[in-house]
Amino acid sequence: MSLNDLVTIAETRHSLRYNDNDSDTRLSLLIGAASVSILRWLNSDGDEYRNTNGDIEPGNVPDDIKVATILFVGIMDRNTDSNEGGIYKSDYLPEPVESILHSRRMPTLA
């Protein structure tokens, strides 16, 4: 688990219905990528979810952000080589992920 992961491998494995840990290395990479992308999109450094060691503590992350992260991992896991259904747009998260997170996004001020 990396210091920026918004969810655990166990939460992701359970939600995506993996029955074993054979995919944990790939899931770990996808969790890291999804977490960083989501934090950037939210314009957040994740400080509100960090423990005293400076690591994000998944237990401190709100459920909607966890669900969005797991959904994003699932989308990336399913669509490794394509943009099936056009859900990826340049500089945006997949639409289902954005719809969950939209109310939490801090606007960028010019």
Image: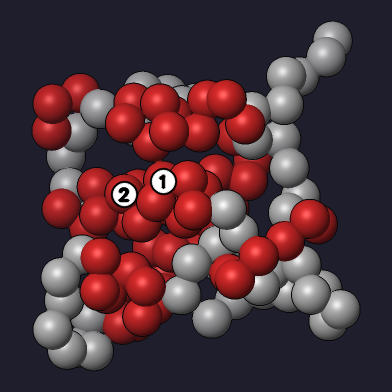
Q: Where is residue 90 in the image (x, y as percent from the top left)?
A: 42, 24
Which of 109 and 60 lies nearest the eye of the viewer? 60
Q: Residue at x 20, y 64 (%)?
A: 16
Secondary element under disc 1, as helix, strand or loop, is helix
The local crowd at label 2, few if under 14, some if 14 to 19, many if 20 or more residues have their Cα within 10 Å, is many
Q: Which residue is drawn at 19% across and 33% down?
A: 83
Above/below status of 39 relative to 6: above
Which of 88 and 7 lies nearest the eye of the viewer? 7
Q: In which quarter of the image is residue 77?
A: bottom left
Q: Do the residues labelled 2 and 1 touch (CB within 8 Å)?
A: yes
**Furthest-bottom residue in this view:** 21
Residue labelled with disc 2: 71
* Quadrant the C terminus occupies: top right
The local crowd at label 1, few if under 14, some if 14 to 19, many if 20 or more residues have their Cα within 10 Å, is many
Secondary element under disc 2, as helix, strand or loop, is helix
Q: Quadrant of residue 107?
A: top right
Q: Which residue is drawn at 55% across and 62% down?
A: 6
Q: Which residue is drawn at 16% across and 39% down?
A: 82
Disc marking residue 68: 1
State left or right for residue 87 relative to residue 53.
Answer: left
Above/below status of 47 relative to 64: below
